[in-house]
Amino acid sequence: MKAVIAYLLHNHIDSALLDYDIQEIKELAKVIGFEVESVVIQKREPDVKYFMGEGKVKELSAMVKDLGVDAVIFNEELSPRQVRALEAMLEPAQVWDRTQVILEIFRRRAVTKESKLQVELAGLNYLYPRIYGLGGVMSRLGGGIGTRGPGETKLEILKRVIRGRIRKLEKELKEAEARRVTTSKQRVRNTMQVSIVGYTNAGKSTLLNAFSKTSKPSYADDKVFATLDTRHRRFLNLEGKPVILVDTVGFVNFMPEKVLDAFKSTLEVIRYSDLILHVIDLSSPIMDEQERTVMRILEELGAGDRPVIKVYNKLDLYKGPVLQDGISVSALKGTNLDELKNAVVSALLTVDNDAVT
């Protein structure tokens, strides 16, 4: 399927970050089956009705017809009003925004029951205020659900059904969280915990596999959001206490708030970690921006005060100067992993001694 990216530039952004962000949206689109034919950039403040200027939207409409485009993907989250107006202008192409694309990737990548519930909740919270903007299609989806009275429209019925489903999902996730908290408390008493965090595709799962000798390694791939589920692996024993590595979902720039809210209960494991390994992709042209993104999300999760070791990964792809504020490794090639392991042990001994004193 063919797609065009519509990129509204209304904040100061350097060219390297702009190019990378566009490339990231292309990669996100590719994951769900779209090949990007063109990128349309406009520099202005967001328009209340069309997000972009009306003239630029007409230009997009012409591209839809000329190129046979199946979807126009916008770089930010659209309001319900903007979705309605854009769908009318850009038909027959679908209108997607960044949040919707990420939600679709999460839906496809979710494996465990809990991650599937989290993704569904995020999706319904995204959909709910947009129901009236989805017009006849959504109205038809309401058919067969049942009615409560002659004055209730199908869209109102559908909103009621979605509200009920959201409440049910929230309840199930709270129950899952309560079970996880109980398990986490038992782990805290009996083990030490090291959480691996980082930007998506930085190599977190590869590092987990390199450190945990297991016959069933965790899935790792060179793609965005390759894994969503939290994984625990035994790492080593430290003074008779097992050390557990925890791998979590990767972060991304402009992480949709609805996604982050849905996964916060799972990500709270980071808050109770004895140590955080922040995996940073040395090969990324915007490494510094990705690092800041991860640190900002850690603050939002209440984990900003946890001890952190910076792990500069993908050393095999890096040709620059040695970075002194962390440890440079290649998780794929096994380079400098012993040095990192020693640093982890040293940091955990410090944490343990502080706890005793």
Image (cartoon, helix red, strand yellow):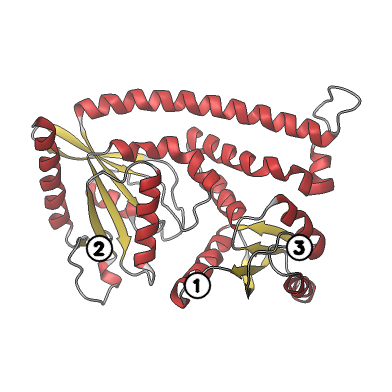
Give the x, y percent position of residue 205. 34, 51
From the viewer's side, name the closer residue of 5 and 206.
Answer: 5
Q: Residue at x 86, y 29 (%)?
A: 152
Residue type, label 1 = Leu
Residue matched to label 1? 18
From the viewer's side, name the closer residue of 300 and 238.
Answer: 300
Residue type, label 3 = Ala
Left or right relative to 114: residue 153: right
* Element at label 1: helix
Left or right relative to 79: residue 340: left
Estimate the spatial distance between the alpha carbons at disc 2 and disc 3, rounded to whole Å: 43 Å
Crowd around label 2: few <14 · some 14–19 · many ≥20 (10 Å)? many
Estimate the spatial distance between the alpha carbons at disc 3 and disc 1, rounded to whole Å: 25 Å
Return the disc, 1 or 2, that comes first in the chain's sequence: 1
Q: Is residue 28 above or below residue 156?
A: below
Any part of residue 208 in sight: yes
Give the x, y percent position of residue 41. 62, 74
* Element at label 3: loop
Return the disc, 2 or 3, that comes first in the chain's sequence: 3
Residue matched to label 2? 330
Residue matched to label 3? 93
Look at the image and tell me in which quarter the N terminus lies.
Answer: bottom right
Residue type, label 2 = Ser
Return the disc, 3 or 1, that comes first in the chain's sequence: 1
The image quarter containing residue 222 is: bottom left
The image quarter containing residue 301 is: top left
